[in-house]
């Protein structure tokens, strides 16, 4: 066999072996992919507690850039926070459990493709900054890592299966194979409100008792000497109170500012009343006040960034004349007091740029949002002090004097012998009577008896006449006899002391209950301020318009009134048109 023939044989054998190798490898890959069906896509990820970080990246087709949303556990506080939202505290336990469990239990239903060219078809292109503008088929990247930032799962989620809405196309980041899995995309929401306690104030509208509407604005004006400056423009200050017993609103005060810092009291005219519908709408809007997004509040010394949000440092003093660093807002404020002594102070800033809320509000394209800062304080006027019952005075015990002491007992005396009867003096001219005679004694007895009988005989006719007169009188009806007045109850010292002790204990109970209410309100204020202090919240403009009311918003014309509202036509006599004007046509000039 020539060398040429040998060479051709060797080449042919090599080709055959190469072909066999390719077919063998292809068959092995196909067998391995088929073995994945019914198995967990992330077999080594079995413990949800090891998950310490969740990152979700979407591609924003409006701005042609990836947008990342992240939730992680803070190493210092061990609390879930949202890094993409300035580390705002997340209420993420439940939502995190849903997302992580969905990946642990994820099983392969089928293999859709093995080549990278199909990634755009199935919507599993990775969302990166390298994606060309207008590219379609970009998926959602979900990554889970442990405390050491080691990836436990990393999945690109694509389109739904056209034949089954419960199925989606996915692929593992860095691999070409596209799988079909059963997956609920709501477990991987980037809606900010789903990861936090979105109820900003967490109040019950039935607890609202007072609302103060401080309508002012901070505007750009030009000062002749200083040039462009910010000026506080005060419009009105309105206070209303909710009467719980009568279930209606009442006016606390109505103030207008005709001069800076000088409120002028005003009153409703005869044909005006409070607009209860708008006030009730305000009360419900406070309950519905939701957080759309957040920005970390800059320090009061950072005036430039504060003013970008619509807030301005305003040093002032508290009720004890202590200096405090306060702020004023570009669009006024509202104070809301609850029956438990909590007062919320809401200050409204400027409108939020659209790009600042895109990451937190998925439907933010057509909506308008506004900055808001919130503070809490104690309103003691809402917690009535107890009415204490006066204690009765206990009579003092007087000191005993020697003469007040009980007399000493004396020994019983023997009865004295009866004194001898004194003899009556005898008339010297009369002879002593005969001891044996009794005539004189009988005569004396007869003489003593006669006057008594005579007196009896004289009284008898009068008594008979009196009895006859009483019989002759007609019978009188019985007279009602009033019961004798009860003698005043006199309590002993021990009884008074016992009553005073009972009153004292009841007063102590009332005072303790009052102090407990104050302490509970102070604790709640502290908790709320720890939540509010460092943040500028982003709220929906629709809710802002329901809460931020002016004085004219809460006053309306009475329904039964026939005349228009003339309260501003004549300041000296509200409700009365100026002389010469037609009350039905107030815009016409006076007639000659």
Image: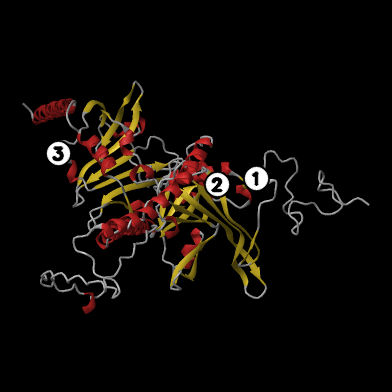
Q: Secondary structure at mark 3?
A: loop
The answer to whether one can see residue 221 in this image is yes
> Which dot marks residue 556?
1
Residue at figure coordinates x 60%, y 67% from the top left: 261
The answer to whether one can see residue 352 in this image is no
Q: Taking 185 as reference, is 442 above or below it?
A: below
- Specify the farthest residue to the right: 592
> Distance of mark 2 from mark 3, alpha carbons?
63 Å
Quarter of the image where the N terminus is located: top left
Q: Secondary structure at mark 1?
A: strand
Tag 2 and tag 1, C-beta contact below 8 Å: no
Residue 34 horizontal/vertical position (percent): 18, 25
Residue 138 horizontal/vertical position (percent): 37, 37
Residue 66 horizontal/vertical position (percent): 38, 45
Q: Which color mode does the image show?
A: secondary structure
Residue at figure coordinates x 45%, y 51% from the top left: 538
- Specify the farthest residue to the bottom: 402
> Which dot marks residue 249?
2
> Distance of mark 2 from mark 1, alpha carbons?
13 Å
Query: Callout 1 environment at 10 Å: few (<14), some (14 to 19), or many (20+)?
Result: some
Residue at figure coordinates x 22%, y 28% from the top left: 108
Q: Secondary structure at mark 2?
A: strand
Say whether residue 532 is left or right of residue 441.
Answer: right
Of mark 2 and mark 1, the one earlier in the sequence is 2
> Which dot marks residue 44?
3
């Amino acid at each position: 066999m020539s060398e040429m023939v040998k060479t051709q044989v060797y080449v042919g054998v090599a080709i055959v072996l190469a072909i066999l190798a390719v077919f063998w490898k292809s068959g092995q890959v196909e067998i391995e992919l088929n073995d994945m069906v019914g198995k967990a896509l992330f077999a080594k990820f079995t413990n949800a507690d090891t998950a310490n970080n969740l990152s979700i990246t979407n591609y924003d087709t409006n701005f042609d850039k990836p947008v990342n949303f992240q939730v992680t556990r803070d190493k210092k506080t061990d609390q879930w926070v949202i890094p993409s939202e300035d580390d705002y505290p997340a209420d993420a336990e439940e939502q995190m459990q849903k997302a992580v469990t969905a990946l642990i239990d994820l099983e392969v239903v089928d293999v859709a493709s093995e080549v990278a060219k199909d990634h755009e078809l199935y919507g599993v292109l990775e969302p990166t900054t390298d994606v060309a503008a207008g590219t379609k088929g970009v998926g959602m990247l979900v990554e889970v890592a442990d405390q050491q930032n080691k990836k436990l799962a990393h999945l690109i989620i694509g389109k739904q299966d056209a034949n089954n809405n419960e199925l989606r196309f996915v692929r593992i980041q860095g691999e070409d194979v596209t799988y079909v899995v059963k997956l609920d995309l709501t477990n991987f929401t980037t809606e900010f409100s789903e990861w936090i306690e979105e109820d900003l104030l967490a109040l019950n509208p039935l607890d609202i008792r007072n609302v103060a509407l401080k309508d002012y604005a901070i505007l750009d004006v030009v000062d002749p000497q200083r040039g462009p400056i910010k000026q506080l423009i005060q419009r009105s200050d309105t206070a209303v109170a909710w009467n719980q017993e009568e279930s209606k609103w009442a006016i606390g005060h109505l103030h207008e500012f005709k001069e800076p810092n000088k409120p002028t009291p005003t009153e409703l005219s005869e044909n005006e009343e409070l607009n209860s519908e708008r006030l009730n709408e305000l009360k419900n809007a406070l309950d519905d006040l939701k957080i759309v997004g957040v920005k970390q509040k800059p320090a009061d010394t950072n005036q430039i960034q504060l003013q970008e949000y619509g807030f301005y440092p305003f040093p002032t003093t508290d009720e004890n004349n202590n200096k405090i660093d306060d702020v004023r807002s570009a669009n006024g404020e509202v104070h809301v007091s609850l029956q438990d002594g909590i007062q919320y102070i809401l200050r409204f800033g400027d409108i939020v740029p659209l790009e600042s809320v895109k990451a937190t509000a998925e439907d933010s394209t057509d909506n308008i949002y506004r900055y808001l800062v919130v503070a809490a304080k104690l309103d003691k006027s809402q917690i009535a002090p107890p009415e204490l019952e006066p204690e009765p005075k206990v009579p003092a015990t007087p000191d005993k004097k020697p003469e007040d002491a009980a007399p000493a007992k004396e020994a019983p005396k023997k009865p004295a012998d009866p004194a001898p009867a004194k003899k009556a003096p005898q008339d010297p001219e009369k002879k002593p009577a005969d001891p044996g005679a009794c005539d004189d004694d009988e005569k004396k007895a007869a003489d003593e008896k006669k006057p008594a009988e005579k007196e009896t005989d004289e009284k008898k006719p009068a008594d008979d006449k009196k009895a006859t007169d009483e019989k002759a009188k007609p019978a009188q009806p019985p007279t009602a006899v009033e019961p004798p007045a009860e003698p005043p109850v006199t309590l002993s010292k021990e009884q008074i002391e016992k009553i005073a002790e009972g009153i004292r204990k009841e007063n102590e109970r009332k005072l303790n209950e009052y102090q407990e209410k104050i302490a509970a309100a102070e604790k709640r204020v502290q908790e709320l301020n720890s939540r509010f202090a460092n943040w500028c919240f982003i709220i929906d403009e629709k809710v802002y318009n329901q809460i931020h009311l002016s004085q004219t918003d809460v006053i309306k014309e009475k329904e039964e009134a026939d005349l228009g509202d003339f309260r501003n036509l004549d300041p000296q006599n509200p409700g009365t048109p100026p002389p010469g004007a037609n009350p039905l046509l107030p815009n016409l000039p006076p007639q000659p």
